[in-house]
Image: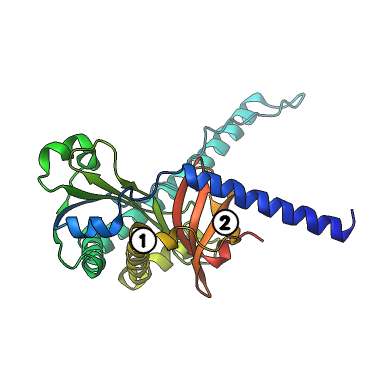
Amino acid sequence: MSSLSFSKSLIVFFLLLATNIRAEEAAYLHSVVMDIEGFKDKADAMHIMTHTSKFSIFPLSHHNATFIQTPQVQGGDAVSSLIGALIAVSLINSHQSKESDAAAKFNADLSSILQTMDISEEFNAVLQQKLAEHFAHTQFEVENALSRNTLNQAGLLVRIKQNYILTFENRLYFDSKLQSLCFETSPRLWLKDKVKPAYLSEVKYVSNPIMSEDKGLLKTNWTQNNGERLKQSIRDGLQASVEMFINDFLDPAWKTGPETAVREMAMINTNTGKIDKHPLLVLSETPDRIAGRMFAYDAAQLISAPKSQIAH
């Protein structure tokens, strides 16, 4: 194939990709269904409910049961072969036990660090500040929900008096390699008498990675100096996630981005640990980070990630 033909094929591919993303975006319910200016005038009071899941790191190793097939050597001692197999199993179990102990210690270190900050309170403070900048005449009442089930609309219809209810379900976790911290939130705007949300989105922040494959070094990087890197990454995630939500919630122009800015985002699959690639509709970027709407696993998600995760 000539270079000209290849270039034409590549252009057609990206045009089709962009068209497909536009179609997916049109089908994805993520926008406020009312006139936002009119909504600003009406929303004189708003109840905000947030829930942040407990942050924990599970043991990094989830090995399946290991079966050792002892080779049958003609004339060999069956008892010696069996003893060799038992020793091998013992070594594997010992290795798994050490990994579990290390994970438990890491969990304990993280818990100790996180007792020095209240993630929900810090998230609520950033959220209120940003909303107040746009809703100058609105009174906000903020509540920390003890259970994520409290954020379901069936309960909201009964419990909340205000007409407008904003809920945020927050999740915090590492990627499977422990290199990056991820902060996710699921904003929903509910109207008092409606069962389905008037606005919904999924927002994700991925911290700048620690470039190492050494698990011990990675754990140390997150926990040293009283967890300075961990706490700063969490605060960066809170700030960026709220800003993406505010832009998506209030700025129709921000939802679309440049018409041709379609990239491919390489993400670590938290279930398999493998690299998955997903289309990304770029909305904004800085020299080291990129924000956009990523289409993955039959859903769309607003995401801010390091540019190092752009597939090449």
Residue 102 placed where, x, y %? 40, 53
Pointer 2 residue = 265
Which circle marks residue 112 in the picture? none
Image quarter in which the C terminus is found: bottom right
The vertical placement of 296 against 233, above or below, is above
Image quadrant assignment for residue 119: bottom left
Dot 1 lies on which element? helix
Relative side of 44 to 89, left or right = left
At label 2, the amino acid type is: Met
Who's the residue at 25% across and 63% down the image?
Answer: 127
Dot 2 lies on which element? strand
Closer-to-camera residue (200/276): 200
Q: Is residue 72 visible?
A: yes
At label 1, the amino acid type is: Ser
Who's the residue at 89% across and 53% down the image?
Answer: 1
Residue 261 placed where, x, y %? 59, 62
Contact check, label 1 and label 2, Cβ < 8 Å: no
Pointer 1 residue = 241
